[in-house]
Image (tube, rainbow, N blue to C red):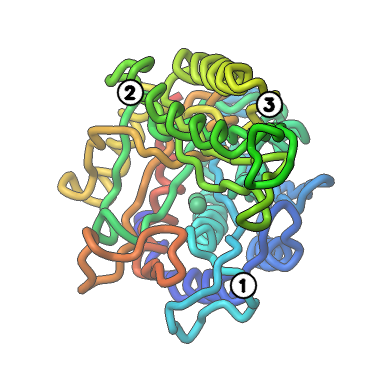
Amino acid sequence: MGVRDDAEAIAPELVGLRRAIHREPEIGLDLPGTQGKVLAALDGLPLEVSLGTALSSVTAVLRGEGAAPGGGPVVLLRGDMDALPVTERTGLDYASQIDGVMHACGHDLHTAMLAGAARLLAARRRELPGTVVFMFQPGEEGHAGARHMISEGVLDAAGQRPVAAYALHVASADWPAGVCSTRPGPMLAAAEILAVTVHGHGGHGSEPHHAADPIPAACEMVTALQTLVTRRFDVFDPIVITVGSFHAGTTDNVIPDDATFLATVRSFSPEARDKVRESALALVRGIAAAHGLTVSAEFRDGYPVTVNDEAETRFAAGVAAGLLGEECCLAQPNPMTGAEDFSFVLEQVPGAFLMLGACPPGVDPATAPNNHAADAVFDDSVLAAGTALYAELALQRLARS
Ligand SMILES: [Zn+2]
Ligand SMILES: [Zn+2]
């Protein structure tokens, strides 16, 4: 039987695992319940399993016996495991049982797929011409779990660096179920937080000339940042700045001491990323100074651009097309403006990040609620396909080396 058939054969267990994780979602770097479910799913397989210390990660190493002396190459497969602070509104019978927490980004599917792939590959251990590292990662949603796992040694878990690394990500909208999409080069944006506090001096709202009002200057900054986007950046190497939080003052007739805002800043090249860091800080400092105010402004570390390696992406797209059908493997025209901490892995190991449609049948992907929405639904039917794709990527990449 082929990998795809084997994956279909274990589909009921994959669905069971995925739904169990979905019912009990956990946020951030500490996911003890999810870690326990993964360990139970891997139990009995011929894996070297190690757990994270700063986070509840699981690293599992499968050493194939079909390798040349020396052990053969290493391939890394990554699945993230964390949920989001969202109150689920899907009405599904396996909906979250934890208030205010939901697997709204489909990481429950990634976890189940990766555990399934470990099982399929373990069954092929005899002929497996190398080693596979399974990276079960907490804290993708803003907690840089991948960076923590790298500093705890996931890239060296097999004793030598992987020749390639792959990650799948499901989508509840945009693509029909089972359709894969990827592109070489920038695949996802870099994301950082710009945090700004304008310092003035409070006073009576009727006498602004006796105070130093931070609000108009902060408003000017918000507008000027949008002008910065269009006047200072190449339209073909774009950036996105969205001020998503703005706070100042308590009532109508009191000028506050401070005004604070937070922006998410997205870019697609190291050049644009460096430039926006420098120019946005210069802009807010200049505006503050022009109004006789001071400002504290900083970029908080986010995720770098997720850059797919040319050759690995061509290879992975070929594997996906072979497995899912040519018509189900799309060449993605543009990067996505979302961000991913798999970017930290791809900074050190060539590889590819692939999207996999998981929109339920009968729902229009163009209008379906997308990832992070409280009513986002990811269809179980893609679990076998994703499991097989993870397994085939490892098998074929090791065979090629
Ligand atoms: Zn997400
Ligand atoms: Zn995600």
Q: CA distance from mark 1 to mark 3?
A: 35 Å
Q: CA distance from mark 2 to mark 3?
A: 24 Å
Where is mark 3, residue-wise?
A: 295
Mark 1 vs mark 3: give the one in front. 3
Q: CA distance from mark 1 to mark 2?
A: 38 Å
Q: Position of residue 100 (x, y in %)?
A: 61, 72
Give the structural element (helix, strand or loop) at label 2.
Answer: helix
In this view, 67 is above or below 230: below
The answer to which of marks 1 and 2 sits earlier in the sequence is 1
Res 196 → quadrant: top right
Mark 2 vs mark 3: give the one in front. 3
The residue type indicated by label 2 comes to Thr
The residue type indicated by label 3 comes to Val
Res 40 → quadrant: bottom right
In the picture, measured across the screen, residue 387 lies left or right of residue 234, that is right
Please give the name of the residue rendered at 78% of the width and 49% of the height, measured from the top-left corner: 51
Please give the name of the residue rendered at 41% of the width and 22% of the height, measured from the top-left corner: 228
The verdict on label 1 being within 8 Å of ligand 1 is no
Q: Residues within 10 Å of mark 3 (few under 14, many from 20)?
A: many
Is residue 65 visible in the rendered structure shown here? no
Where is mark 1, residue-wise?
A: 100
The residue type indicated by label 1 comes to Gly
The answer to which of marks 1 and 3 sits earlier in the sequence is 1
Where is mark 2, residue-wise?
A: 230
Is residue 104 visible in the rendered structure shown here? yes
The verdict on label 2 being within 8 Å of ligand 1 is no
Instruction: Please name whichever residue, 63 or 107, is drawn nearer the observer in this view of the structure.
Output: 107
Q: Residues at badges 1 and 3 in contact (C-beta under 8 Å)?
A: no
Please give the name of the residue rendered at 66% of the width and 50% of the height, measured from the top-left corner: 249
Q: Position of residue 109 (x, y in %)?
A: 49, 62
Q: Position of residue 263 (x, y in %)?
A: 54, 38
